[in-house]
Image: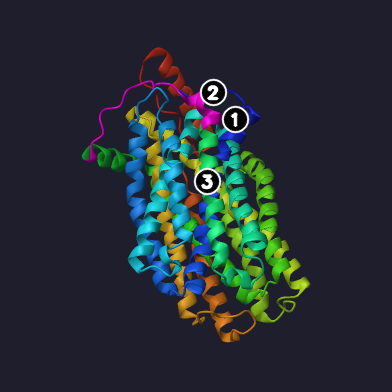
Amino acid sequence: MSFTNGPLPLRLKLVHGFGAVAFGVKDSGFSFFLLLFYNQVLGMDAGLVSLALLIALLVDAVIDPILGNLSDRTYTRWGRRLPWLYVAPIPLAFAWVIMWSPPGGEAPSFLGLLGIAIVVRVLLSACEVPSVSLLPEITSDYDERTTLFRYRYLSGWCGGILMMLLAYTVFMPGADGLLERDGYVTFGIFGAVLMAVSVLGSAIGQHRLVAHLPETKPPPFSLKGAFAEIFEAFSEKAFLIFAVGGLAAYVAQGMTFSISNYLNVFVWQFDEAALIAYPIVLFVSVILMFFIVGPMHRNFGKPKSAQISALTSFAVLFTPYLLLLMGFWPEVGTLPSTVLLYCFLVVGNALAVVVMVSASSMIAEIVEAFLERTGRRAEGSFYSGNWLVQKCATGMGIFLTGQIVALSQLPNNARPGAVEQGVIDSIIIYFGVGSALLAVISAYWLGRFPINRAEHEARVAALAAAAKTGSEPRPPPKEIPIK
């Protein structure tokens, strides 16, 4: 049974969402700045940096399901999730500082970068998996779950955008500032503090609601048992369909984020004012998402919303690049070019976030399907599975960016406006082909997600009735297609 019934109070939505700020800080750092920092500032090869980040993500992705299973099995008077949220954020903060301040002030070895990247990602998972796993426990309502994810994504983006804004205005101001080392040190320290405050503050704010012994005591943890349960959870048909579509969507997101600064600096030749405006424009797009995702889910359902948004987002976001290649775009670096690009970005990015909100919210419905089939709740396993998919995909996206940069032969220490046009065209073409393919794959599979609103609500009602009577729940009725 969920912790609440009916509409959720605004305070709970805000407090629960606040925990995602840490994820936004991490995402902004890894996706927008880390490759640029280690490649263009510290002088490491872009291909090696992207490979190290990919391996770190893959290692973390393997560990995630174990963390999720441990979270599901945690049995304390503070519940299953809170102990993790109180323990993990402080070491995460220290590891984050070290990532942006390599010992000795020089580029680390490949293994050194790999090691600190793994530590940061595992500790972040120890915060994020338990935090998001609270969501299906808080409410079973189809629309309220969307609402909680709206607040989580809004908070996560706010954290990431705040870091971007401070990076462009305070820590590394100006296009050349992104290529100077000193600003990244304070960037890391501020981000570390914000991460710790976010996770701890959210945990404290939800403590009264979720801090109690779980209804049933799980069996002791064993590695063999954990992998058996993880395998069973991941065999759920709905999860497998989500995983394929989500994988493509997350690869696209990872590639888009990690290549953004390359595109902004070298393709669009943003000046300092344009760079400062960039995170603000992203914030406007997330606000737009916040208001359109609810009506889209009510009118089309989550799978159809994800499908429509994936295809439309690609079409909108790539249009400026296509026009630029065809010679129908204003001169790059000018005010008309920047303003027009940002108009496309507001709409395209809003729809891209709708895809992510829709996909994440779908996972909550899988929890009850698994509970009906097995009699067990496994929020941690499913959301760690989501992170497994996301991290493998994000790592692949960053890896693809590294390969795009390498294949296009963009030189190290390149300067805006001094890069050959053939190199710029190559970056755009590689990026466009990859984005188109990923958009089609994600739209196809997310659109085939098998749990709709009617089936979910029938299942929740059956589970609630079974809990009152102590009987086995009857499966919800399947929809009969009208011929």
Residue farthest to the right? 336
Q: Nearer the viewer, residue 150 or 359?
A: 150
**Residue depicted at 64% across the width and 57% down the height:** 166
Q: Is residue 483 visible?
A: no
Name the one closer to the observer, 18 or 107: 107
Q: Estimate how packed mark 2 is, as few (under 14), some (14 to 19) or many (20 or more) residues with alpha carbons within 10 Å.
A: some
Q: Which residue was labeled with disc 3?
A: 195
The reply to whether the C-beta atoms of the residues labelled 2 and 1 are less than 8 Å apart is: yes
Q: Does 66 appear in magenta?
A: no
Q: For the point 47% across and 69% down, which residue is it? A: 38
Residue 4 shows which numbered tag? 2
Which circle, 2 or 3, is nearer the viewer?
3
- Residue 459 lies, with reference to residue 251, above or below; the image says above
Marks 2 and 1, how far apart at CA: 11 Å
Q: Quadrant of residue 318?
A: bottom right
User: Residue at (75%, 75%) from the top-left corner?
Assistant: 334
* Kind of residue at badge 3: Met
Q: Looking at the image, tell me whether mark 2 or mark 3 is earlier in sequence order.
A: 2
Percent x, y of residue 111: 33, 65
* Residue in the image at 38% along x and 47% along y: 240
Report how far apart the C-alphas of labels 2 and 3 lie in the structure.
Answer: 27 Å
Question: 363 and 403: which one is in front?
Answer: 403
- Mark 1 belongs to which amino acid? Leu
Q: Which mark is residue 12?
A: 1
- The mark nearer the N terminus, 2 or 1, is 2
Q: Magenta part of the protein: which range? A: 204-223
Q: Residues within 10 Å of mark 1 (few under 14, many from 20)?
A: some
Q: Position of residue 53 (x, y in %)?
A: 41, 62
